[in-house]
Image (tube, rainbow, N blue to C red):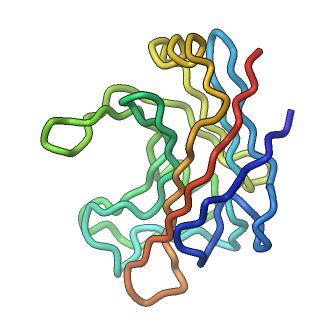
Amino acid sequence: MRIRLTPFIMMLMLCTACDRTGSSAGATAEVTPNQVTFTIPVEQRSAWRWNVGSTPRNAFEYDWSISQGVRSFGFSVWKKGDAAPEQGNLSELVKAGQGSIWEPTSEGGGRLVGKIGVAAVRDDSALQMVLSDQSILKELLERRPSTLEVVSKTLDTTKQQYTIVEQRYSIALNYR
């Protein structure tokens, strides 16, 4: 089942979950008792760039995250120290990043509490994130929210300076 996204654009520069006109791009969320699979369309790029020179050390360059309760989960790529610039297709970007589950800390940061599976799908036009954390699944199945918020943060490589474009939108959940 394809799910329609409703965009809530904070900065209208790039749209990673929609095409250039802002229409639905076919995001899906399938919830079963064993896992939830999110398929998030991303902007088509001839090449994804990371570890860009203008990015501060240890700063995020790409992040697609979903919150459920106090936890967040998703896929992130950040510049690791003084790493050399790289580029490639979406599959290569996925290899450079990490699928994670985070909990907030009392200091205002986050603590890694688990991993999720991430793959590039649909001919490198979407990210597929597979979550099998039983506590999050249990909460989803008990509360049965109709939507969850997705926050997309992407590096704008057309700018000379470090610029992140953020977009928020909701994704409907299909329970099986």
Please, is residue 150 above or below residue 133 in the view?
Answer: below
The location of residue 148, given as percent across then percent down, is 58, 37
- The one of 172 and 81 positioned closer to us in this rendering: 172
Residue at (68% x, 47% y) in the render: 40
Task: Return the residue found at the far left.
Answer: 107
Check the picture and name the quadrant holding the C terminus.
top right
Residue at (43% x, 55% y) in the render: 77
Please, is residue 4 above or below residue 82 in the view?
Answer: above
The location of residue 128, given as percent across then percent down, is 66, 40
Check the picture and name the quadrant holding the N terminus.
top right
- The one of 28 and 62 positioned closer to us in this rendering: 28
Task: Return the residue found at the far bottom.
Answer: 160
State which quadrant residue 28 falls in: top right
Residue at (58% x, 68% y) in the render: 48
Please, is residue 59 above or below residue 84 in the view?
Answer: above
The location of residue 137, given as percent across then percent down, is 54, 16
Residue 38 horizontal side relative to residue 75, left or right: right
Residue 167 horizontal side relative to residue 115, left or right: right
- The one of 51 and 111 positioned closer to us in this rendering: 111
The location of residue 42, given as percent across then percent down, is 68, 58
Residue at (61% x, 60% y) in the render: 8
Residue 142 horizontal side relative to residue 17, left or right: left
Please, is residue 82 above or below residue 77 in the view?
Answer: below
